[in-house]
Image (tube, rainbow, N blue to C red):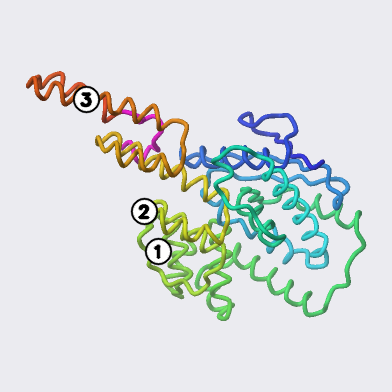
């Protein structure tokens, strides 16, 4: 049986968890830490693989807002770095995806069931990468691939692949060492890739300089996302509309309160993380409606998301509204104001800091 175990962070349980439960815990903590505008790291150990005999160890950054941006990192980036092991890497990821999908199908939680279940292996693989938050900056990558070599025979390396890998290695080195001006001059045909690498490396100051000198739609898109200029994100005609970019777009729509558009994008992406974010946004929308006295709007949202907290808040809101109406008739301004403030503060502890301001 495949298991995940967390270490190096007191917030996480120490016992071994199933793949699905481990992913759920990881996703929850990612959302919580982002909401607190904090950052942390947790180490995961995956055991029980039939592909990698000695398992996998890696560090996961939390709360940096880069979780969804790194969804393709585990597959594409590692395959780029270790092309001779691509088959084994994909087999390992597919093994995790199938285990996640199987365990997810056994869950009875209606919120978790609200996301569509993957219908094939490719979808299962992407759901794992999206839902997980297995957004691993792999300190343990060397350890992992040592055991890949130990577990499986090496595949022949195509000379063209080796040449491409060498070129990418030079570009990544230049990202770290060269100025924005030098990057543009030395790699004139790699502008989109440079933007991607600068964004992944969280080098947004350099990206801003590079965008000023060598403007691209992709550069403007990533900078707007980093600066949380959500209206600019959704208006940017990014030419590189990858799954990763669609996830970023969906996040921007959520931040703007345009949840229907986020749901449309997620119908194809099938991201559990996005689904959780959408549900949370609907819940906040309902709470804000309650605070304004719009109980019908809150009730409609509750029908859609079936949240555990909203029924009590709605009933309490109705009571507050009745008290406000009563004191209004009595022309008792003081008590009317007291109950209005109570109504306006309902559910405030469940709102993000931004919504409370």
- State the residue at coordinates (9%, 23%): 329
What stretch of residues is rendered in magenta?
346-357
Judge whether 143 appears above or below 186 on screen.
above
- State the residue at coordinates (52%, 70%): 241
- State the residue at coordinates (71%, 29%): 14
- The nearer-to-camera label among 1 and 3 is 3
Residue 327: % across, % down:
13, 21
Residue under label 1: 234
Q: Secondary structure at mark 1?
A: helix
The residues bearing labels 3 and 2 have C-alpha atoms spaced at a distance of 32 Å
Q: Secondary structure at mark 2?
A: loop
Nearest the viewer among 111 and 206 is 111
Judge whether 175 appears above or below 139 on screen.
below
Residue under label 2: 256
Residue 347 lies within the magenta run: yes
Q: Secondary structure at mark 3?
A: helix
| Mark toward the start of the polypeptide (3 vs 2) | 2
Q: Is residue 344 left or right of residue 97?
A: left
Residue under label 3: 322
The residues bearing labels 2 and 1 have C-alpha atoms spaced at a distance of 10 Å
Residue contact at pointers 2 and 1, CB within 8 angstroms: yes
Q: How many marks?
A: 3
């Amino acid at each position: 049986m495949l298991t995940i175990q967390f270490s190096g962070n007191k917030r996480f349980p120490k016992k071994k968890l199933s793949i699905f439960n481990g992913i759920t815990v990881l996703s929850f903590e990612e959302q919580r830490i982002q909401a607190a505008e904090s950052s942390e790291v947790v180490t995961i150990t995956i055991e029980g693989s039939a592909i990698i005999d000695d398992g996998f160890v890696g560090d996961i950054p939390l709360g940096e807002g880069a979780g969804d941006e790194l969804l393709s990192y585990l597959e594409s980036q590692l395959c780029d770095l270790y092309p001779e092991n691509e088959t084994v890497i994909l087999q390992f990821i597919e093994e995790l995806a199938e285990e996640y999908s199987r365990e997810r199908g056994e869950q009875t939680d209606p919120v978790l069931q609200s996301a569509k279940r993957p219908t094939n292996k490719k979808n299962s693989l992407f759901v794992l990468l999206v839902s997980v938050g297995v957004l691993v900056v792999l300190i343990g990558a060397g350890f992992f691939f040592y055991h890949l070599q130990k577990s499986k025979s090496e595949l022949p390396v195509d000379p063209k692949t080796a040449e491409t890998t060498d070129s990418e290695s030079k570009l990544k080195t230049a990202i770290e060492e060269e100025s924005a001006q030098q990057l543009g001059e030395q790699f004139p045909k790699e502008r989109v890739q440079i933007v991607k690498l600068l964004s992944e490396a969280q080098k947004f100051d350099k990206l801003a300089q590079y965008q000023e000198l060598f403007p691209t739609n992709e550069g403007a898109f990533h900078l707007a996302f980093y600066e949380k200029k959500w209206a600019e994100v959704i208006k940017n005609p990014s030419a590189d509309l990858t799954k990763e970019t669609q996830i970023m777009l969906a996040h921007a729509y959520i931040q703007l309160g345009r949840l229907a558009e986020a749901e449309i994008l997620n119908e194809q992406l099938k991201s559990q993380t996005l689904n959780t974010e959408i549900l949370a946004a609907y819940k906040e929308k309902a709470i804000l409606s309650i605070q304004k006295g719009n109980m019908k709007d809150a009730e409609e949202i509750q029908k859609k998301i079936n949240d555990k907290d909203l029924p009590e808040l709605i009933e309490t809101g109705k009571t507050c509204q009745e008290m406000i109406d009563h004191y209004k008739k009595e022309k008792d301004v003081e008590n009317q104001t007291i109950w209005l403030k109570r109504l306006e503060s309902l559910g405030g502890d469940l709102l993000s800091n931004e919504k409370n301001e």
